[in-house]
Image (cartoon, rainbow, N blue to C red):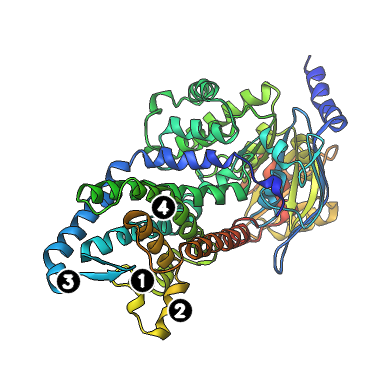
């Protein structure tokens, strides 16, 4: 049973490639003297949960803004639902929901009015808008705050309201730009729970995030960006297996003999000075040898994570 | 600019401003209600005794009757200009309201037009209230005075458009002091609100003629008093051209500011 589940997961990207909901080809975005997006191509399939990862300034938000027609590309093609964004932006925008990074809620309006007025921008009739408003407030556990002013809401409630608002037009594609940044763990898990429900309902989603745990948990497939280019693309599991290895050993207070040992066996690792992180490739079991000979102070044996992949590919230097 | 970027959808943005306004309208309408009362009291009690009757448009008017229509025109300027400067800037920069709208089928052009039309609507509402108060005191000729309401909407478009143009180019909200100091205040003082422009020396007259407020004041006196000192058609055309040019400039500069 387990193997069949794994198989169906692995087949998903192929199905996705057959009927893409987003096609991006050779996309460029130049601002005065910087190139924010430097020749990016990718597809997102129907029903797929797709992640855009990368350090600050990598070009994620710029790409996302071009996807929903907010900012015009310098060069390249973006097709959403098979339509060109530069020509059919109005038809496309009517069918997507966007959860922007900034809080763009109307502070002068109540929770309920925020949804209701926003529904008007999509020309949803008032009766229908009122029904959807009620449903969405229920789904995001905001019904008891429907008359509250936005200024009186907590950070988690604000995020949930922004999410609710992005669903008011019953979109076929949801675009989420860092939907859980700044939330406490409880709020974050609540948002993840709702997003998983939406995913199960077949909604296509594009997500940017700085939380690797979030990306691993939600994304079927993702790309890691840096310097406006895509570095890698794949499912979280595949990327971990390929770029970090399934098993990772962190060794505190490494000595020269360990460094020599690793060099002799050509084990992929990151040397951080006070700490060495080993990425053990499949079929090369070195953990026994390490445990016996080098674990004098502190050794952590753990599974490889997306965070390992991310840091290995984009480096550990600060970006800002 | 392509025409398909503009549609009736701009009313949705207009309605958003109305919904917001409904929360504060009681406070907002106190100003146009009280302001004319204060001016009428101050000028008829204190000023009229010193100034005496004013010769304007071939008639003798009491000073209070002379300035009453101009007060409405000034309120139109202030309501529209302050709405598309400070209030629009807050919506654009601090509340990111326009960013949110741009994730919907609305176009940037519709948002801009809606802001201008909204400011004109607010100006017309304020003018209507002032008109009612001044009519009670007998300073407004009826029914022609009722035309001051559509006139206020028309003038509101002109001042709302120029305000939004400044919002498109101003770096910080504090810098609105500059257009207010250099544009609004001189206009308020030299547009024939307080004295007939025909009293100005010859060299200063073209300056007043260049001010859109002067033309709005002229048209306001025409509908409220049946008197004027310039050709009304010229004033109407001037305001229309002014409104058109600054609406176009607001579209260009707001787009440049918001779409990156």
> Left or right: A11 with respect to A104?
right
Mark 1–mark 4 Cα distance, whole angstroms, equals 19 Å
Circles 1 and 2 on the same chain:
yes
> Left or right: A247 with respect to B114?
right
Mark 4–mark 2 Cα distance, whole angstroms, equals 24 Å
Labels 1, 3: front one:
3
Mark 1 or mark 4: whose residue is earlier in sequence: 4
- Residue labelled with disc 3: B52
Residue A237 or residue B16, whichever sits in front: B16
Identify the chain of the residue marked 3, using the numbered disc in the image.
B
- Secondary structure, mark 4, is helix
Q: Are marks 1 and 4 in contact (CB under 8 Å)?
A: no
Q: Which mark is residue B152?
A: 4
Total numbered circles: 4
- Secondary structure, mark 3, is loop
Identify the chain of the residue marked 2, using the numbered disc in the image.
B
Q: Quadrant of the C terminus of chain B?
A: bottom right
Labels 1, 4: front one:
4
Circles 4 and 2 on the same chain:
yes
- Residue labelled with disc 2: B206
- Secondary structure, mark 1, is helix
Labels 3, 2: front one:
3
At a point 59% along the width and 31% down the height, the residue shown is A123
Q: Residues within 10 Å of mark 3 (few under 14, many from 20)?
A: few
Q: Residues within 10 Å of mark 4 (few under 14, many from 20)?
A: many
User: Does residue A293 show up?
Assistant: no
Mark 3 or mark 4: whose residue is earlier in sequence: 3
- Residue labelled with disc 1: B185
Q: Is residue B47 above or below residue A183?
A: below
Q: Is residue A221 above or below residue B152?
A: above
Mark 1–mark 2 Cα distance, whole angstroms, equals 17 Å
Find residue A108 and report its horizontal and vertical position in percent.
40, 42
């Amino acid at each position: 049973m387990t193997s069949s589940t794994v198989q169906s997961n692995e087949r998903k990207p192929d199905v996705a490639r057959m009927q893409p909901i987003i096609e991006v080809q050779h996309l460029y975005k130049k601002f005065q003297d910087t190139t924010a997006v430097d020749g990016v191509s990718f597809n997102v399939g129907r029903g797929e949960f797709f992640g855009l990862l990368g350090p600050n300034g990598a070009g994620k938000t710029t790409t996302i803004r071009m996807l929903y027609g907010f900012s015009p590309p310098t060069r390249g093609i973006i097709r959403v639902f098979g339509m060109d964004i530069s020509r059919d932006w109005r038809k496309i925008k009517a069918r997507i929901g966007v959860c922007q990074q900034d809080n763009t809620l109307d502070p002068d309006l109540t929770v309920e009015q925020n949804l209701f007025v926003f529904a008007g921008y999509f020309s949803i009739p008032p009766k229908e808008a009122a029904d959807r408003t009620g449903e969405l407030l229920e789904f995001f556990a905001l019904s008891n705050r429907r008359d509250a002013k936005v200024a009186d809401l907590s950070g988690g409630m604000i995020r949930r309201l922004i999410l609710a608002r992005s669903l008011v037009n019953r979109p076929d594609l949801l675009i989420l730009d860092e939907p859980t940044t700044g939330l406490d763990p409880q709020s974050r898990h609540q948002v993840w729970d709702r997003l998983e429900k939406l995913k199960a309902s077949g909604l296509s989603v594009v997500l940017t995030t700085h939380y690797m745990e979030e990306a691993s948990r939600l994304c079927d497939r993702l790309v890691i960006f840096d310097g406006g280019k895509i570095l890698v693309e794949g499912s979280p599991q595949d990327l971990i297996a390929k770029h970090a290895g399934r098993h990772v050993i962190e060794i505190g207070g490494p000595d020269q003999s360990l460094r020599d040992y690793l060099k002799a066996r050509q084990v992929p690792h990151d040397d951080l000075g006070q700490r060495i992180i080993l990425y053990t490739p499949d079929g090369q079991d070195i953990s026994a040898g390490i445990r016996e000979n080098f674990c004098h102070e502190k050794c952590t044996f753990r599974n490889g994570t997306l965070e390992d992949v991310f840091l290995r590919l984009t480096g550990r230097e600060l970006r800002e | 600019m392509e025409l398909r970027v503009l549609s009736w959808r701009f009313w949705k943005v207009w309605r958003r401003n109305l919904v917001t306004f409904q929360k504060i309208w009681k406070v907002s309408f106190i100003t146009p209600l009280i302001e004319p009362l204060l001016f009428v009291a101050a000028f008829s009690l204190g000023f009229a005794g010193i100034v005496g009757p004013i010769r304007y448009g071939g008639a003798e008017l009491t000073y209070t009757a002379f300035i009453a229509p101009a007060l409405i025109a000034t309120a139109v300027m202030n309501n529209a200009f302050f709405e598309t400067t400070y209030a629009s800037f807050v919506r654009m920069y601090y509340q990111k309201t326009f960013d949110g709208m741009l994730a919907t089928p609305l176009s940037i052009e519709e948002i801009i037009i809606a802001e201008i039309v909204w400011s004109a609507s607010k100006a017309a509402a304020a003018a209507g209230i002032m008109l009612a108060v001044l009519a009670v005191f007998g300073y407004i000729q009826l029914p022609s005075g009722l035309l001051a309401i559509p006139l206020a909407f028309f003038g509101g478009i002109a001042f709302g458009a120029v305000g939004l143009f400044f919002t498109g180019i101003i770096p910080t909200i504090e810098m609105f002091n500059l257009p207010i100091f250099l544009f609004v205040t001189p206009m308020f003082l030299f547009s024939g609100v307080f004295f007939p422009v025909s009293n100005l020396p010859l060299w200063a007259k073209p300056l007043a003629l260049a001010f859109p407020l002067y033309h709005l004041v002229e048209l306001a006196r025409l509908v409220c008093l049946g008197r004027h000192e310039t050709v009304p058609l010229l004033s109407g055309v001037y305001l229309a051209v002014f409104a058109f040019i600054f609406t176009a400039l607001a579209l260009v500069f707001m787009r440049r500011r918001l779409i990156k």
